Amino acid sequence: MKNFADRLTDRIKQLNNPTVMGLDPMLSYIPDYLLTEWRNEVPNNMQQASAMAIFDYNRLLIDSVCDIVPAIKPQFAYYEMYGIHGIMALIKTIKYAQDKGMLVIADAKRNDIGSTASAYAEAILGQTKIIDDTTPAMFNADCVTVNGYLGLDGIKPFLDVSERVGKGIFVLVRTSNPSAGDIQDLELKDGKTVYQTMAAKVNTWGETLVGDNGFSSVGAVVGATWPEQAVEARKIMPNNLILVPGYGAQGAGADAAVASFTSEGTGSIVNASRSLMCAWKKRTDLEVSEFQKATRDEAIDMRNSLNSALKDRKYV
């Protein structure tokens, strides 16, 4: 059984594309004709209709890029806000993407300890024993984002499940939000910053899950909006995968987004959400019904920009 790191790096190499499409759906992102279609299809339950429209939109977006983009990253909050029907749309989205050959990074940022952390890990990555003593997978994602600031107590259950079923985790190290430095750049007594210390922990936690390609299934989240810190983080984590948010709508360009890649141009995957999901809103040359082409064109541009930036590294 290949581990997550090998499956992801193999797919990136096969497609020559180190990108992941974030699926963080808002109804305002979806063309009106799809909303109307589902409003008419389920007239007596607008919560269900909303969730059905979200899945339908996700399905069409996945269809538009599944042969060129290795993975999707659904953010759980955008589905949970629609209640049980939103959760069902999330589960269907995960399965649909996997059936199309894509890996799924569950952006859930879970954070707890002991049996609660184990429950999160089994729910998202593993299996759950049910009343007939079978153990089906519930969300069955390939990987999940986690918050490591509770220490190993909150991480080990995810490590155990990942090792057992070949899954992975991305631990928050240096996030892309504007106020990240308020905490993550604080200097500790030994002179290291908080994020540098967390990066060192991730490196240690991932030592037993290094795959054949040389990368661990225990990865880190390091935002593209902080390229200098990304370079430093890579030095501390030479064998850890790095998930890079912040490209596109959050303001980072290709040069900054590739700062965490290894000297061989590997080991990281860059996320774009709104810039792909809403690409159709910028295209006056296309009909709204052609939103899939807009997303595909944007995904190709992103791939080409990242590969070009990797050939001429600005941050080293």
Image (cartoon, rainbow, N blue to C red):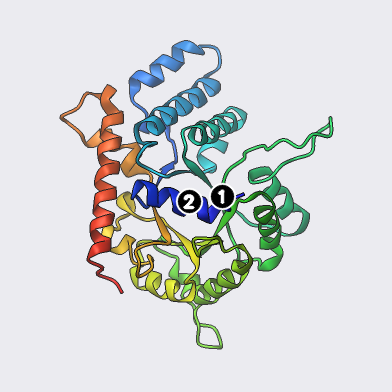
Residue 8 marker: 2
Report whether 210 appears left or right of 182. right
Kindly tell me whether residue 19 is visible in this rendering: no
Q: Position of residue 262 (x, y in %)?
A: 38, 68
In front of the other: 74 or 261: 261
* Relative vertical location of residue 200 with respect to residue 22 in this rendering, above or below: below
Question: Disc 1 marks which amino acid?
Answer: Cys
* Marking on residue 143: 1
Q: Amino acid at mark 2?
A: Leu
* Picture quadrant of residue 37: top left
Q: Residue furthest left?
A: 285
Residue farthest to the bottom? 190
Which of 264 and 257 lies nearest the eye of the viewer?
Answer: 264
Give the Cα distance between marks 1 and 2: 10 Å
Where is residue 154, by image quadrant?
Answer: bottom right
The structure residue drawn at horizontal position 28% and vertical position 22%, both measured from the top left corner, is: 289
Residue 25 x %, y %: 44, 36
Cβ atoms at labels 1 and 2 below 8 Å apart: yes
Task: Determine if residue 312 is in view.
Answer: yes
Q: Is residue 59 left or right of residue 254?
A: right
Q: Secondary structure at mark 2?
A: helix
**Among numbered discs 1 and 2, the one appearing first in the sequence:** 2
Instruction: Please tell me how crowded label 1 is: few (under 14), some (14-19), or many (20+) other residues with Cα within 10 Å.
Output: many
Q: Residue at x 54, y 42 (%)?
A: 76
Q: How many marks can you see?
A: 2
Q: Is residue 225 above or below residue 43?
A: below
Query: In screen coordinates, is 193 left or right of 154?
Result: left
